[in-house]
Every structure is written in C-alpha cells, then in structure tokens.
Image (cartoon, grey):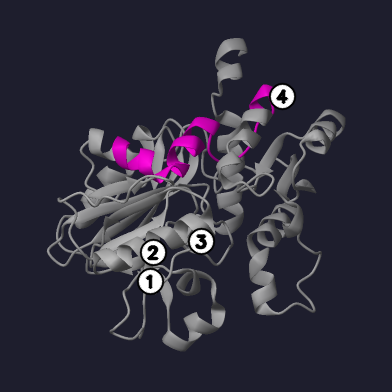
Amino acid sequence: MIRYSEPMDARSPSNTPVKCRRVLVVVHASLVPPESLEGYTPQQIQDWRAEYDIVSTLRASGHDVRVLGVLDSLVELRSVIAEWEPHVVFNLLEEFDGIVAYDQHVPAFLEMLRQPYTGCNPRGLLISRDKALCKQVFAFHRIPTPQFAVFRRGQRLHVPKQLRYPLFVKSTTDDASLGIAQASVVEDAASLRARVEFVFDQNNSDVLVEEYIEGRECYVGVIGNERLTRLPVWELDFGSMPSNQSAIATRKVKWDLDYRSRYGIGSRPAVDLPAGVEAQLDRLSRRIYRALGLSGFARMDFRVRADGSVFVLEANANPHLAAHEDFARSAAAAGLGYPQLLQRLISLGHAYRSPWRVLYG
C-alpha cells in the first residue's frame, strides 16, 4: 500500500480551517480569465482554463483575489504588491516577454521583494527548464533516462554511435509539447537532420535528441518543500490512434479537443503496472525532485516498458493546474480536492524557506 506523506508545512485542509488571504494571481497578459464561461467555445476556454479555474475556485473559497496580467514589464507587479500587500502571489506565468527561458526571473523578482509565491523556486525552474542540463543531472545521479545528444545551432550535426534509431527530437527548452509532432520520431539520418533543422528554425533553440522508448506514458505528481507527497501514478491513454503513428504526447494529443475526441485520447489512473514499478516510480520521483532542487509542486514524466523497465523523460516544474487536467485529477484520487489542492500550494508558498527567509527569518 502506498503511503502519501503529509507535509509538515502544509497540513491537510480537511483538518485545518482555511484562512482567507489576499491572493494576487499573476498570469500572462493574454490569459486574464473572464468572469464567466458563457459565450465561449470549449477550445477558446482551454486557452485560459487553468487561470479561470484557479481564480474562480480561490474566490469561492473565500480568498480576496486580484488578477494581474504581465507581458514584458514588472513595474505594475511591484506597484500592486507595494500597495495591496498580498499574502501570496499565485504564480501562473510560464514565460516573460515571450521568452520561455525567462520564467524563473519572475519568482526571483518576487524573492527580492520578500514576497511569498506559489510554485517552484527560481533555481529549480532554471534547471528543470533546461532539458539537456536535466539529462546530465539524471546521468550523474544514475537516474535511468534514454540515451541522448544535444545539437547546438551552427554546429556540425554528428550523431553519437551509441544512439539507436528510432530517435525523438525536441527543443531543449520549450514545454507543453510545443513543436512535438509525429515527425518528431525519426528513423534515419536524413529524417533526423531535417527535423533538427526544423526545430532550430521554428523554436529558435538548441535541440535534444534521445532514443525513443516504446511503452506506457506515466505521470507522477509530487507536492512539497522539505517533505514530499507523491500523488497516484497517472497514465496518458492514446485511445485508438492509428497503429502507424507513434504513441507520443504531441501538441494535438495534449491540446486539440477534436483530435482527442476522435481517437478517444484521455488520461486515467495507471493500473496493472508490472510488479515493483509503482514503488520504483515513487523512489525515482522523489530523487528527481531533490536532484533538481524543486519546490512547491512538479510532475515527472516516465516511459514504462512492458518488461517493467522505467525511464524518466523529463521533469515539469509548475505543471498545468486546470481542474480537469492530470495533476489535479491525480490529487483528487489521493483525496485532495481541487480547492484543497490550491490551498495546499498556497500554504507551501508561505512555508518555503527562500534565501531571504533563511537569512532574515
């Protein structure tokens, strides 16, 4: 039986009254949610679904909530914090000024203001965002991950001999399956070269190439700072996708509602895992969380082969938090409803020992 440890710094809301707070929800300027879903299509709603779910749920829980859209300036953020003095900033920014790699600078700015915030710390965001660096950390800690190589812009394309086709090609920095398509899985050198050049041009980033692992795609959520709660293992069900397509989480698989409906794609609790795999996923998720210096909450993505061998694909700090998405559903399966999950993240943000807190108390 799996035991879900209770963080010392965020006791379960089921036995602790919720304290209403001033919560400043910081979102991308284009994702400020409306007051109501009325008049919007499901696909339109999906763009800002997490923002809407969080804001409406926090307000229904009694919190005093303000929403601030941020694009390329932190001046207004600083002004609102100085004037309103929020108890916590609920950080939903995944980029700054259109640059994904700058997302860690927002919590760094909040730390310099000595402002508590939800989600991962700047260092954990920086390391986990860089997929190539993550792979090196995994290798150092002997955490099983597919063989890989990194290709830099302007350098000669040389494929190491230890890499075996098929290979999977993706950006070293982008997330949310940006740029991931069926063409990301390549079978030969010509296809590899073409896809690497495509990612260079489309994503304007270095390219990570790793061995493609055939198997089940499993997600493991972790919540906590010093003490960790591991959520139930979740699985991406590829439904009735054509057999000539690779079972990978492409942009369409994750976000295209019509495509998902057509092939019956969804997610569910992972059942009938090979013996010992769940315990292994538990150990690896905790090791990854510690190795990358994560805090708040994160999701680890794994591939599990039929023989029970496990490979970590990547770690996602601050994963998608919509009420119907994998992380929240996994938390609900562990007995942590959506309002309680958000309250837990707020409590963890308050309790996180950031450098200013360690120094000044």
Total count of labels: 4
Q: Is residue 276 above or below residue 324?
A: above
N-term mark: 1 or 3:
3
**Magenta: main secondary structure:** helix
> Which badge, 2 or 4, is on the more N-terminal residue?
4
Task: Kindly report the distance in space between the C-alpha atoms of the residues bearing marks 1 and 3.
Answer: 13 Å
Which residue in the structure is indicated by mark 4?
Answer: 113
Question: Within 10 angstroms of label 3, few (less than 14), some, or many (20 or more) residues?
Answer: some
The amino acid sitting under disc 3 is: Leu
Q: Residue at x 27, y 60 (%)?
A: 303
Amino acid beneath label 2:
Arg
Q: What's the mark number on residue 183?
A: 1
For mark 2, what is the residue?
Answer: 195
Q: Where residue 178 is drawn, which disc sits there?
A: 3
On screen, residue 275 versus residue 149, left or right, reads left
**Part of the protein shown in magenta:** 111-137
Residue 234 visible in the snapshot: no
The answer to whether residue 232 is magenta is no
Label 3: element kind: loop
Q: Mark 1 against mark 2, which lies toward the viewer?
A: 2
Q: Amino acid at mark 4?
A: Leu
Q: CA distance from mark 4 to mark 1?
A: 44 Å
- What distance separates the C-alpha of mark 2 from that of mark 3? 14 Å
